[in-house]
Image (spheres, rainbow, N blue to C red):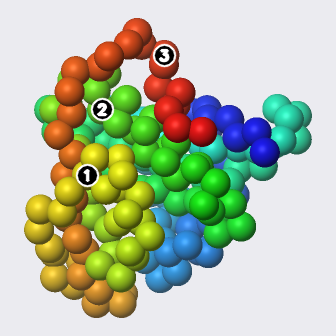
Amino acid sequence: MDVRLRPLRLDDLDRVMELEDQLFGPGAWSRGAYVEELTTAPGRTYVAAVVGTEERERLVGYAGLAAADEAQVMTVGVDAAYRRRGIGARLVDSLLAAAREHGARTVLLEVRASDEGAQRLYRRAGFEPVGRRRHYYQAEREDAVVMRARLTPSPGPVGTEGAGRA
């Protein structure tokens, strides 16, 4: 299966909203939140993972980052039917590359305390747990584990992001 990474676009939002509902239920972001992130929020990088040809591609994952001196992973989602194929790892790698390009030295994220699979993914990418936010996911009153990755300067030229693990 050939998975390509490309920038997330406004015309992807119908599919993103399907995945948001599937993956995050009551905690899903709204279409308006994504429109704002993609059009007006500074320092944002959003990436889509797609399969198929450019003419008939299907979005199977997406991820977003807010970057400044410190970067924040905003979201990572992979269609349940496409998990355990390295797509999440490639998306996270692309966010880390974008954070380096923005000059960030650390990247933070929150992940559901119950989502052990995501926590393993983030650990493999270099994140480590640094704290906990009680009832962070308000709809379910679930805690979040706060994780942090410390970055080294970018090792390659601009444009090599997304060339990570297959």
Give the residue number, with chain letter if any, for mark 2. Answer: 99
Residue 53 image-quadrant placement: top right
Q: CA distance from mark 2 to mark 1?
A: 14 Å
Q: Residue at x 29, y 86 (%)?
A: 142
Q: Quick check: 112 above or below 44? A: below
Q: Position of residue 157 (x, y in %)?
A: 40, 9
| Circle 2: element type | helix
Labels 2 & 1 near each other (Cβ < 8 A): no
Mark positioned earlier in the residue sequence (2 or 3): 2
Q: Position of residue 19 (x, y in %)?
A: 62, 66
Q: Amino acid at mark 1?
A: Phe
Between tags 1 and 3, which lies in front?
A: 1
The one nearer the camera, 120 or 144, is 120
Answer few, some or many: residues within 10 Å of disc 2's Cα (few below 14, many 20 plus, some between 14 and 19).
Answer: many
Q: Position of residue 49 (x, y in %)?
A: 63, 44
Give the residue number, with chain letter if any, for mark 1. Answer: 127
The quarter of the picture where the N terminus appears is top right
Mark positioned earlier in the residue sequence (2 or 1): 2
Q: CA distance from mark 2 to mark 3?
A: 13 Å
Give the residue number, with chain letter if any, for mark 3. Answer: 159
| Circle 1: element type | loop
Q: Quick check: 87 above or below 32? A: above
Q: Position of residue 12 (x, y in %)?
A: 67, 47
